[in-house]
Structure formats: C-alpha cells, structure tokens
Image (spheres, helix red, strand yellow):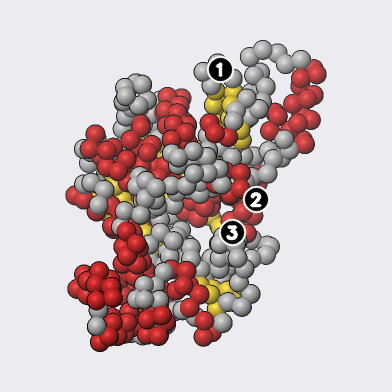
Amino acid sequence: MKQLSIARTVAVLLAFVAGTPLASHGAEAEARRFASNHQGVFGGQKLRYSAIVEENFITDAAGKRTASIFTTSYIRTDVPKGTQRPVIFVFNGGPGSASIWLHMGYVGPRRIDFKDVVKPETAPPFNTVDNPDSPLDVADIVLIDPVGTGFSRILPDGKPEQFYGTAQDAKVTVDLIQRWTRQNERWNAPKFLLSESYGTIRAAVVARLLAGGPMETGSMEGITLSGVILLGQAMDLGGSAGDDGRYLNTLPTLAATACYHGKVTGCTAAGQVEAANKFISEEYLQALHAGSRLTDAQRDSVANRLATLTGLTPTVVRENNLRINAGEFARSLLADQGKEIGMYDGRYTLPLAASGKDPVADDPAMGQYVPGFVAAYNIYARKDLGVAINDEYQPIAFRAVNGPWDYGRGPGGGADKNFATDLAVAMRRNPQLRLMVGTGYYDLVTTLGAADYTVAHAGIPLEATQFHLYPSGHMPYLGTEAREALAKDVRAFVAGAKK
C-alpha cells in the first residue's frame, strides 16, 4: 500500500470524526474492517467464531470506486482448516432496507429481547440476549447491507441509477458473493440465500444470475446454489393472480388473524387457513367470478360465510362487495374496541382514533418494534463487534432508495413483473437447487395465500419446494415459538443439501 501523505491522513481522520463517508472515497484509502472473536451456544453446540464487519468497494470499468458496501460475516473457527461449511448469504428487502431485521431478529449470535413481543418496549432501555437459534452451528453467515442502507454508501464517482434498481442491485450482490467466495476459498461450500420481503426478489434474480450466461452477464460465472429461503415472499409485482385473485389469496390470512384476536371462537390459525382454503375452492372463487349474476340468497350465503371466517359483520362484507382487502380488514376487525391491527403483523394493535397516514411509521407493528431493533443493533455493533464508524446506520432508506427504485421501467417507474419466473429459470438450470418458503400466519402484506399462488404459477418445481407457516407476521421469527420453529426448519433445510 502507498504511504498516505500527512495532509491526506489528517483529511481522512477529520472526515471519519465528522461522520461523513469521505474516509473511504479516496483511491488510496483502505477498506474499513472490524474483526473480533467470540464463542457461544447455537443449536445446542458450543463453538467459537469470528465476526468480521468489512467494507467492500465497488468499482466501474475505469477502476473508480463508485460505492462502499458493508458485509457482516460470522465464521466458525473451531473446525479443521479447509473445512467447507455451508454459507448462508442473508439480506432483507425494502428496497432500501438494511439486514438489521434478520440480523437482530434471527440469524445473529445476539438478538433483540422484548419482554412481550406483541407489546414491545417502544422507549429505552432496550436489551439484547444470546441467540441459540442462530444457524451458526450448521453454516457460516454473511449479512449484506445493500448500497444506501446500513453503513453502505454511494461514493462521489457513483450515481444512484447504478445501484437503485432490481437488475443493478442483483448484479452488485452477485459480485459480492463471488468476491466473498474467492477471498475465503469457499468454492466447494454449499451456498444458500436467506431473504425477506423485497429481498425475495433480489434472491430470485441473483439465483438466476449467479450461474451466468453469455447473453446476459457476458460470461459463465458458474456459481450455483444449494438452496434459497424466502421469508415473506414478494416476488410477484405484476398481479398475475388478477384483481379477484388478491381477495382469494388474502382470505386465509384474514381468517387466521381473526382467530388470534378472538373474533372467531373455538379455532386455531391452521384450522382457519384450512377452512378458508376449502371455502375458496368450493364456493368463493365461483361467487367472485359470478359477480352480479349472484342471486340475493347466494350473495347473503357467501357474505355470512365470509363473516364467520373473518370476524367481520355480514353488513361490512356486503358493503365491500364480498371483497375484503387487508387494509379494510386491519381497520375494521377491532373497530368496536377502538383499535387498528398491524399490516406487517396482525397481532399488533394501536388506537384506531389516533392512527396516522404513514403506512410504515403508523403501522401498529412496524411503529412499535422498529425502535428496539435500531437501538439493539447500534449497541451490539459498537459494543460487541467493535464497529467504530461515526456515520449513521440507515435501517430503512425509503426516500433516497425506495422512491427512485428502477424495477425495469426506469427510476421510480413502478413494477409490473413476476420475478418468481427468475427463480424458476435458476431451478431449471440447476436441478439440485431447492426452495424453502416461510410465511407468517398474520402477515397481511405478503400473505400465505399469495406465497402459495405465486410459487404454484411460476413454473417452479414443487417437488423441490417446501412450505412452512409460522405464528408470526411479515417477520416470521418474531416470538419464541415462531423463531424456534423457523430455526429448526432452516437447520433441516441446510443439512439436507449435504445428503
């Protein structure tokens, strides 16, 4: 490395203290790296591991640094040298979300600790605890914070349109996975993607691109995956189920949520889902197709059945023309109690009268659990991982990243594609690639019905796919029962790749 001049050194130090990303802008600046050693018990195994938070520079064709991306790696160290342990590459969604949610909710060695997960602390102090459910016993873990999230930033020689788009973002993610594999000599390690929400779109496109192809990437990278894990899948942005399909796919989630809040008695979430699916196939689908051709008696019969399943009154169901969307349900289910339920997790509630208009900040789930996650990560990163970065950690960057996102129609152009077909292509190219889909019973944003429909209609081989439901919401690891069940399923999924 070239010797930095005294002036340059002073400038770098001043920039670091000021909290700007200038410390990594210069061509001579070293990538920041924070490594520490730890031990813990995961899956019943006591083991030692290293934690590495490191900066990765993205360069353009001219060799100029255009972006700085941070990854966090957890690597088991008490294994023989050269051991090819599985690797799980982890990212969340947004677009514009850091990996903080999966990091502090499920995969990290420590996690956020709420006394009551559906009535979490919303003001300090917040606590973290050891996380035995982390899959570190069966695989090494690499968390990725995409450009514009976490500590990752666009540099002066880069432009937003180079990174804030589905294709652009996937290409960078592929580059990071290739780089990590090369630097850690893990070519022979089984590789997995663990993704959530919009991250499931990233996973689908990345899975297709990793193997490469002369007509798209210009080469044959030849990196294949052993498995893809989708949590709260959101791959179909094209509405392939049609308008009425949305109501059909949402009904099982509404039925399960009504049971949770006691609006349907003598039920279970699983039983409600089964009953809703039976009603859909035997009566509801035909009723929506019939439209105004339904007789008054038929319409009343359908309305009464929907009311029984969802806990709403027949009057509300009829007023909505037998079509209950998730937002209407969230506002109506507990209206008699003056409460609104969360879209991201229907177990959460806030006063209905005071509900605001921000679909995220005012959501009863997101509005309550976000503060704990943000505080927990910042405390953990600095205290346990030794991360000495004075910049702000961006958990969700909606205005800067999400707003101008390019889904293929230009910046901010919206989305109209079903990206599940990308995953179907990847699975055709790699017959050994397996898929795991995990959904929360109470997720009103990416519903369990939508997950089933999307996978079943995208050409994805069902014999290589497994579905799991968890007693949680959009983050299907919130709560002890859900997290432990997910951890068990992921361990089994990863272990299955080695057979």
Could you say where residue 221 lies in the image, as x and y percent from the top left? 34, 24
Gap in Å between the C-alphas at discs 2 and 3?
14 Å
Gap in Å between the C-alphas at discs 1 and 3?
38 Å
| Residue drawn at (60%, 28%) of the image | 158
Q: Residues within 10 Å of mark 1 (few under 14, many from 20)?
A: few
> For the view shown, which residue lies furthest in the top direction?
2
Q: Which residue is mark 3?
A: 370
- Dot 1: what SS? loop
| Residue drawn at (43%, 35%) of the image | 167
| Residue drawn at (53%, 44%) of the image | 412
Give the residue type at disc 2: Ile
Q: Which residue is mark 2?
A: 379
In the figure, 490 relative to 484: above or below? above
Could you say where residue 64 lies in the image, as x and y percent from the top left? 59, 20
Tell me if 275 is positioned left or right of 112 in this view.
Answer: left
| Residue drawn at (34%, 37%) of the image | 207
Tell me if 215 is positioned left or right of 345 in this view.
Answer: left
Could you say where residue 273 lies in the image, as x and y percent from the top left? 30, 71
